[in-house]
Image: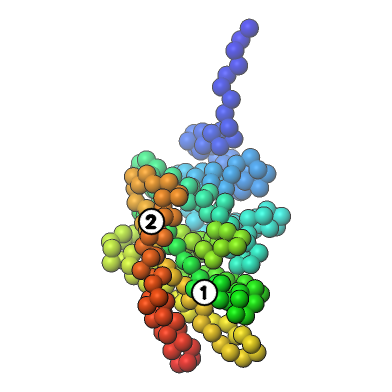
Amino acid sequence: MREEGPKFSKFEEIAGMIGRGDSRVDLDFLKKARNSGEISLADFDTLASKLFERGEHVEEWLSKAAKKLDSKIEKLEIDPVTGLFKRAVFEEKLDALTRELNFDQRGDRRSPLCAIMVVAIDLDDLRSWNNDYSHPTGDKALWTLARSIEKGIREKDSAFRLGDKSDEIVVIVRIESDVSDGKLEEIFQHLKKTTNSGSINVNGGKILPVTAAMGYTVIKQGDSRSIAEILEGADLNQIADKSPEAKTSRKEQAREALEQN
């Protein structure tokens, strides 16, 4: 009796087709496989990166395609309070980007990814927003913070809320050129300024700034940390920003900016 050959996953099958230069595999092909559940979001990102190496310029398409996912899937993956992706999508995305960063790239065409910045963001005083005003006001503060964050990142970057009852938001920033400490700090400070620029109206007229403590860590090629360790690294770099002095300072700066506007 003849033995059956090895069974391959859909991911392995498509990866092999890309490796052979099969012209049937394009971005629409990957989108159909993702929407039908044959491959995961992480697999989609990895296979799209392989197409990029083959000469398919997919970055702009990826950002557009992500917004056109089936509405039922989106409802499961998006936090209803902030409108940001949930933790499961964060983990898939970070895993896919880490694989892209560490992929053995050969030839003239290669992914431009040089490093990944992971930024931890915690809303200041969520408990006070909820207790002193109301839970809907706390939700409004979180929603406002999310919109401020989105103003400071590019379409190729992503923001996520880690838990349904949490004030923790995480941002993934693609670093595609200069990875010097000075450039990384410049990117972070730009995001920090934008993140702390929001405000909400409470009690029928009182305008209060919406601010947050922030810290970041950077993933470079060869980094073997787990997702939990990466988040811990970003949190540790957030400690100084969580001090009473730092919080008072940024709130004062935010209030001054509101008065000037």
Note whether residue 201 is visible: yes
- State the SS at label 1: loop
> Which is more foreground, mark 1 or mark 2?
1
Percent position (x, y) of residue 184? 33, 64
How many discs mark residues in the rendered view?
2
Distance (Cα) linking label 1 and label 2: 22 Å
Q: Residue 125 bears which disc, if any?
A: 1
- State the SS at label 2: helix
x 66%, y 75%: residue: 136
- Image quadrant in which the N terminus is located: top right
Percent position (x, y) of residue 221? 34, 48
- Residue 109 vs residue 5, the one in the foreground: 5
Percent position (x, y) of residue 226? 43, 46
Instruction: Please determine whether, in this image, residue 227 is positioned above or below residue 234.
Output: above
- Residue 153 vs residue 249, the one in the foreground: 249
x 52%, y 50%: residue: 91
Q: Residue 170 bears which disc, if any?
A: none
- Residue 29 vs residue 126, the one in the foreground: 126
Decide which of tag 1 and tag 2 comes sooner along the chain: 1
Note whether residue 29 is visible: no
Task: Classify 10 Å Cα crowding around label 2: few (below 14), some (14-19), many (20 and above).
Answer: some
Q: Residue 233 bears which disc, if any?
A: 2
Task: Classify 10 Å Cα crowding around label 1: few (below 14), some (14-19), many (20 and above).
Answer: some
Q: Quadrant of residue 143?
A: bottom right
Q: Amino acid at mark 1?
A: Asp
x 62%, y 91%: residue: 205
Percent position (x, y) of residue 151? 50, 73
Q: Amino acid at mark 2?
A: Gly
Instruction: Please determine whether, in this image, residue 138 is positioned above or below residue 23.
Output: below
x 45%, y 92%: residue: 260
